[in-house]
Each structure stands twice: as structure tokens, then as C-alpha cells.
Amino acid sequence: MQVEVINTGTELLLGQVVNTHVGYMGERLLGLGLRISRQSTVPDGVVIKGILTEAIDRSRIILVTGGLGPTPDDLSREMTAECLGLKMTEDAAVIDAISRRFSDSAITMRPSNRRQAMVPEGAEVLENDKGTAPGLYLTAGPDDELVHIFLLPGPPRELYPMFEDQVIPRLHAILGNEGANVPVCRNYFFMGLGESELAGRVEESLNAVPGDFEIGYCLKAGGVIVRCISTGDNACVLGGMIRDASPEDFVAEGEAAIEEVAVKSLVHSGESVATAESCTGGLIASRITNVPGASRIFNVGLVTYSNEEKCSLLGVPLSMIEDSGAVSERVAMAMVEGCLERSGSDHCLSVTGIAGPGGGSETKPVGTVWIGLASRGKKAVAFHYRFKAERLYFKERASSVAIDLLRRRIQGYL
Amino acid sequence: MQVEVINTGTELLLGQVVNTHVGYMGERLLGLGLRISRQSTVPDGVVIKGILTEAIDRSRIILVTGGLGPTPDDLSREMTAECLGLKMTEDAAVIDAISRRFSDSAITMRPSNRRQAMVPEGAEVLENDKGTAPGLYLTAGPDDELVHIFLLPGPPRELYPMFEDQVIPRLHAILGNEGANVPVCRNYFFMGLGESELAGRVEESLNAVPGDFEIGYCLKAGGVIVRCISTGDNACVLGGMIRDASPEDFVAEGEAAIEEVAVKSLVHSGESVATAESCTGGLIASRITNVPGASRIFNVGLVTYSNEEKCSLLGVPLSMIEDSGAVSERVAMAMVEGCLERSGSDHCLSVTGIAGPGGGSETKPVGTVWIGLASRGKKAVAFHYRFKAERLYFKERASSVAIDLLRRRIQGYL
């Protein structure tokens, strides 16, 4: 069944409000086994009529948001009625509900609010107890190809409860599929390998699997999300095979941030971490402390941005910085070893690199970074990377990779 | 001129990624005097062909995002060529650029990446130095009704620079309006007062100004953005009046981050800053080091998350923490004074608070925070706030306010 979403609202096209309705509806509809096949945004006003006419031609379920307010540019009701050739009448119950709302909040009802009680003939009113704009449910076309049209309010706090309480039950009835075998969407987050490399491994791993499933890939948060949509009973099996396509690179099911996974692993193992950051400037410490409960595993982070502070706080010899440069394997190792000793933590991370835009050279171009990792009782190691990215994204990438190294260490892959 | 935006990406319709492209483009297009008349989202795959065919019929400028990646569901190139009846050939320069990108980052190029170098005949390649997917610019139809089609990458960090550097100049050329009297949209960023308070002051200040302009307000980044759309010649005068409505709270024109303004002010005054953070966990240091050139004004940041580290690194007396609690005026002052002494910087910031969700009490609920500020030769001060917000937004708010206190100090308002 083709599902189409139409969002009306000039503010959505001017960049003043981000459209979060589509994602919300997409997620909820998937739970019913429905997928949005097309979503459109049009400005306020009469244009809704044209796009609704098109949509009725190609879709069976149409969800319209916005244009139910009291101002002159709110025309979803009127244009839908015109489009379907329906007369409008004032609905006494709706007038009552609106007047009650106004008297409850001691605001005077304005004549324009009466427009919100106009209902096309044959439409069902969807009550709105969060605002003055009721929703509407209409059908069009022949019985065997009935098109279902929902007019819904734009503000999320009015839309979401109406969608949950009044749209979803009606969709269930339309589909007649309560308890049926609806598709399951699962995400698997990997770090440390590219999209095409991972895709190759996943396709290989799923090569021999029969059945109905769909795999998608999406770059996100310095890693790759593998999305698997399947119809229920084989979701777990597929998930296992996807994870096993590259087990050491697998971070988490869902969209958990890498720092969340690392902090949870530390809490689980009862260990702690400290940080010694130069080019990431505190971002690793900040990401670790984004996770509730971080105080159980994190005591101290040292942002040693200048060479002097690398020496005085971490005990890096000045001669080493003069010989090898601050961005070098030796300094990354000395930083992380100094941090381990100073902090008394079980693990330490160090980062030294060139975030740019200035500061690069032929041998050490902007984007060069060394990440050190030390753990109590293990030899310190340092890894070299180059992230060609502007400053903020460079910091994001370098901090993600550092936290992922920690994750690999705690999980025994490193 | 009808402008249409088509976003491809199944993830946008499944609720995994929020579509922020529309808003960004809408804002930038307005600066050229253009408005988006319709935006659509369709899933990955062949469906792009149908909607592109429709769009060519009704619009003159078509902006397509997504579907330029290396995986099999990325079909924007191929479908556009089919739609316009164009052959595709491999572009040697693009192959070169992609191979170079892979060899630079020491990742193996896979055969699927070669698809990204296929270019429909007659198309202009829009270089992408942030990723492997080049953009494409094509035209269709008769000369007097030429339709302009831009195929652009989906990831924001690749899309935005390409839009700024390669799409906007081409749109200027298409419109032939360089220097014409298009509407000017300017933003003014304020911190430290509420939206309605600021609106009151701005309206009062602009009360007597005649002429055609439109004022809007938008909460953003812990402050308020005042948006002024006007037609050119009075933009400067209006801007001056808006700034003067609340000069000490005015941060910057545009949407400059508070840390950018603070760092620039420090570079200008030749002074330095250090940080001693507890609940913000390194976020202040990270935001300061987000600004290019931060190394000139920032040497060290101490993330003293545990009480022991507050004592050992900053010299806060343990008895003070035991008497007053770590989240207190006295500890915020001791932290910032210890940091000033230890770091030798000109200014220091300290933050101690309860980020939640746990750790609150009746007298010190979650969201309580003390921010200390010390400057060489001035008495240290500490301010009390309560940010009722979940953990990440609490950190964001607390760090913004701290950096804004520094901005006020450097600018002489504090």
C-alpha cells in the first residue's frame, strides 16, 4: 500500500523549523509494515490542492500535516474539500470543544477560530485535546481502491498524540493486520572500516541466505550503519551474520554512540580511563562524560595544548619534542605513559595531531594524528592516522577513533 | 523561477536521519531571492527517475541530494542520465581524484568506487574535496526554458561546501542578478536574555523606522537569533539598531558561535585563558579549541572530574569540599583561583555542577551549577545557575554561559 506524507508550512522551506514529522511517522509506520514511498513539503496556502490531487492518484494512504490553524494561510481543510468536491459545514461538537478550550485558558475566542470547526461532509473528526485544530479523516474513490486521507495538525505536541491514539488504530483497521508479521528494522553500527569494504563483507556473509530482507548502508558518526529490514522470524539470524561479517569492528546494535559503548564496557569490567589530549582539545573527555555514570570510570582529563604543559603535566621530555616534534609517535607514547603514571587509571588515551587549517608541513600535513593507548601491565602503543577533514570534523574523527581503540582494548581485540 | 528540492535516502523516510538539508538550502536560496516551491523525499533506488521527470516538467531549478555513493542503491547519476536520455562515460579526472583520496588515506579503492566516476555526457563535474562522490550539474530543455539540475552528495559536510562554492555561484549566473536588489537576510546573535525580553527591546528600538523589513526570532545555541529580512540599502542601519537594543548581550552578527567570538577577542587583546572543568567534562576546552588559532590563547585545560583531582591539580582544600560540597561557590572560586595560579594564564574559567540524571539533592537539584571566572589582577567571581535540561543540553548550556562570561570580561562588560 503506497503511503504518502505531505507537510505544509512555509517555515519548513525557509529553514526556520526542521521537519521531524517524517522521521517520526516513518518509524511508527514501519511498525505497521508500511513504508513512506514519498514525502513532500509545500508552502502554506492553496498549493496543497494540487499536490493532494496528485497524491490521490498514486497513493492509498495520505497523511497531511499542517494548515489546520486559524490564520488565512491555513487552507488544508478547504482545499481538501474542494479537491474531493465536498461541501463544508460547521460542526457543533467541534465549536463546543474549541470554545471550552478558550474559556478554560481565559483567552477570548476569535472569529477566525470558527473556521477550525468547518468539516467536509462525510469526514470523521479526530479530536485534539492539545490544541484548537481538530484533525480530519476522509476517504475517496471506489470501495475496492479506497484512498484514506488524514489531515493532521503541524505542531509536534498536537500531532504525536493524535497520530498514536487516532491514526494508528485506524491504520490497523484499514490494513486488517493486527498482530500480523510486520517488518523489523534493525541497525548495526561498525567502526574502523569503509562503507564499501563493509558492504563487501556483509554481502558475502549474507550471500547464501534465502528469504525476504533488505540491506542498506549509511555513513554516520565516524562509522557505518548497516540497516537490515526483514520480516520478523529471521531478524536475529541475519543480525548475527551481519555482526559476524566483521566482529572486531562491530560497535553496537542500534545507534549507540561509541563513547556509550566504551563507558559501559569499562563500568562492566570495573576499570577506569584518563585522557591526555592535544589536538582534540578536551573532546574525548567531554564525550566520555556525556555518558551518565561516567564519574565511576573517569577521574581526570588533561588538555595539554602547549608543549610546556605536555612536559610539566605529563613529563614528556622537552628534548623529545624538539627532536621528533610534538606530533610524533614518541610524543604520543610519552604522553600516554605519563598520563597512566600520573592518573593511576587502568587505561589512558593520548592524542597529538594537526587539526588545521594552519600548522601543517610537507612531512606532517594537516590531518596527521598519532593516538596513543596505554593500559596497566601492557606495553603502550601508538597508531598513526590522517583525517583529511576540516577542523571540527577532524576532532570528531580523531576522538571517535581514539575511543574505539579503547573499546577494542577492553573487549580484547587489541 | 520555480525551485524544487529532491532528497533521496531511505534513511530519511525511516526516521534514522533528520532532513536538515531543506532548511539549510531554503535559507541560502532566500539570500538569492529564491524560495523553494516544493521539496520531496524518496527512497534510495530507481524511484528518483519518476520524480525527476515530474520536476523537470514544473520547475526551473532542481536540487537533488543523495544517491551518489558507491553502493548499489545509489542511483542518482544513472537515473538522471536515463531520464534525460544521456550516455554515461567514465571521467578520467574524477577517477584520478578518487584514487588519490583513497591512497592518501591508505584505504584500498574498491571496484564499486569506479561507478562514482561515471558522468552523463554534457554534465559538468562539481568537485568534492570532502568525499569520493563528485556532484554533477546538467541542463535540459529548450534554451529559453532551460531546466538546471544539480546532483549533490547527501552527507552535510560534503554538501554544504559544494553548495556554497559551486552551486551558489552558478545560481547567481543563471539568475543574472549579481549585485541586484535581492532581499538581504541578516542574523544577530544575543546571549543572556530571553526571547520576549529581547523582542520587546528590539521592537522599541525599531519602532520609528519606516520601510520594508521583516523581523523574526529564533532560540538557538543557548541564545536568541534576531533575523532581519530587508531589501538592501537599509540593512546596515537596521542592524545597528538591533545591536544597540541590548549591546552587552550582543554576541555577533551571523551565527558565529560564542567560542569564536571569545577566542577572537582574546587574540585581539593578546591574552590567554585556561579552564578547570568538572561537570562540563572538557566541553569548554573542546569548544575553545574548535576555533582555528586557539593555540595562541589556550595552553591548558584541566578536567578535574573527581574530588581528589580537584585537590591535587587545582589545590582545592579537601576540607572545603567536605564542608561545602564540590558543587558550591567556594569550590568554584578555589578551582578558578588554583587554575589561574597553576596555568599562568590571564583568565580562567571553572565549572562545577550536577549534570544528572543522578546526583541531585533537595538543596542542590540536578541542573545546579557554579561558574567561576578569574582574571589576573581582578578579584575572582562565581555565579550560580540552574539549567533544567537533560545531561548533554545541560553541558552545552553551562559551557555557553561560561564562555559568554569570558566574552563579557574581555569586552569590559564584567
Image: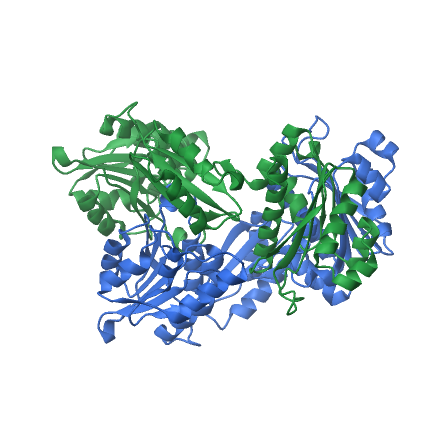
Chain colours: A green, B blue
Q: Is residue B156 visible?
A: yes
Q: Is residue B167 visible?
A: no
Q: Quadrant of the C terminus of chain A?
A: top right
Depicted A47 relative to depicted B386: above or below: below
Q: Is residue A121 left or right of residue B357?
A: left
Residue at the extreme top of the image, as rendered: A179
Q: Position of residue A93 (x, y in %)?
A: 29, 28
Q: Nearer the viewer, residue B134 or A79?
A: B134
Instruction: Tell me which residue sits at (61%, 53%) in the image.
Output: A395
Depicted A53 relative to depicted A143: above or below: below
Q: Is residue B58 left or right of residue A98?
A: left
Q: Is residue A249 left or right of residue A7?
A: right
Instruction: Tell me which residue sits at (78%, 60%) in the image.
Output: A321
Q: Position of residue B132 (x, y in %)?
A: 44, 60
Q: Quadrant of the N terminus of chain A?
A: top left
Instruction: Tell me which residue sits at (59%, 51%) in the image.
Output: A396
Q: Position of residue B222 (x, y in %)?
A: 60, 48
